[in-house]
Image (cartoon, rainbow, N blue to C red):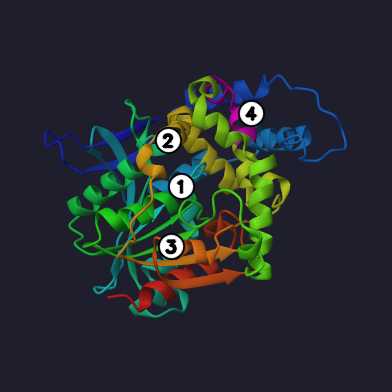
Amino acid sequence: MKATTSASTNPNAIRPFQIHTSQAELDDLHTRLSLTRWPEEIAGFGWNYGVPLSFVKEMTEYWKTSFDWRKQEARLNELPQFTTTVDGATIHFFHIQSPESEAKPLLLVHGWPGSPVEFLDLIGPLTDPTSYGGDAADAFHLVIPSIPGFGLSGPTTEAGWTSGRAARAFAELMNRLGYERYGVQGGDMGAMIAPELGRIAAGQVTGVHVNAATMGFIPFGQVEDEIFMTLTDAEKVRLGRLGQFMKERFGFNMIQSTRPQTLAYGLHDSPAGLLAWTAELFYGFGDAVEAVDRDRFLTNLMLYWLTGTAGSSARMYYEGAHDPAAWAPKDPSPTPVGVAVFQQSDVAIRRYAEQANHLVHWSEFERGTHFPAIDAPDLMIGDIRAFFRNLP
């Protein structure tokens, strides 16, 4: 993938960007998909052993024969997008300004294995609410970056890119854009970066909204019986889901936290391997197979494949696992925090979220997965509006 950018000698310059994928890159992808060497499997166990062979074969065939990358590339290129260099790393971001003069700036931060593609269905309603039956008072200017080392930001080239460092980079990005006051929304890894941004830039961040929140929002270790008995039924379900996840579905995290480079060879070389590795998370380990549109999933996947960032994105898990600051107790944040809990996948529990966060908003929804901006955008839009509506 090559980008069209404007030249500048200013190290802090913000450069216009367009995605350009050569036909040779697409031909290479097609060849690799055609030459996939398939493993065997024990039939009849669904997702118990991992992503089923039938799922990966079907998705790979669709990717090879039916998925229209040129259409998706053109759609992304319709959005204003830019790059800048912060702390030695390239940051790519979409910057969509609202037609409403009083719109509030809002930074949207994805997680792993996500990208700004997650937020496509939020852009219109959040920037131009009146065109979607909403109130002009709920309008936002959107800044949607790729985390350094992820997708269109390209690979990072040095160690130390923790969620805290990414938060500092995003604070600098918003300063360069001239936003003195702004909100932040993040899910998954974005739900680690966003609260950290609310701490280090408390004077600028008006509020932090999170979903798919873990660190700082869940218990670590055994929950005592007397505490367990005080949890709500929904919280007990979430605690059970958390335990099951740590026992049966945490393998990807352990590998990326300890040996990301070893994993990188397979993900960088095999598109089918990259598809299978990321499909577990996107499709809820088989619990949400129908939730995420195939074209949206593959568009997101292409941003990792074409940029060669599967390995560098995985490294952030290693950096986090080996960062003492990430595991140190957090001082209470002064920044207002709102939490959206989507019952199909989330594990956040309010009493733990309140320990180090200035919690002012808590919503629970009966539908929506780990990627609610894709499969429940109406709920995400409504909750983002509700949270930021009453903040200064």
Task: Give the amino acid type for the residue marked by disc 1 in the picture.
Answer: Met
Task: Please name the residue shown 34% across and 35% down the image.
Answer: 161
Q: Which residues are magenta?
A: 265-277
What secondary structure do most residues of the magenta stretch adopt?
helix
Q: Is 275 a magenta residue?
A: yes
Upstream in the sequence, badge 3 or badge 4? 4
- Residue 385 image position (x, y, % from top left): 42, 73
Q: Mark 1, mark 4: which one is toward the viewer? A: 1
Q: Residue furthest right?
A: 44
Q: Is residue 293 left or right of residue 128?
A: right
Q: Which residue is mark 2?
A: 316
Q: Which residue is mark 1?
A: 189
Badge 1 marks a residue whose secondary structure is loop
Badge 4 marks a residue whose secondary structure is helix
Query: Quarter holding the N terminus?
Result: top left
C-alpha distance separating marks 2 and 4 = 22 Å
C-alpha distance separating marks 2 and 1 = 9 Å
Task: Give the amino acid type for the residue marked by disc 4 in the picture.
Answer: Ala
Q: Which residue is mark 3?
A: 355
Q: Mark 2, mark 3: which one is toward the viewer? A: 3
- Residue 217 image position (x, y, % from top left): 49, 57
Task: Please name the residue shown 37% across and 38% down the image.
Answer: 324
Question: Where is residue 325, by image quadrant?
Answer: top left
Q: Which residue is mark 4?
A: 272
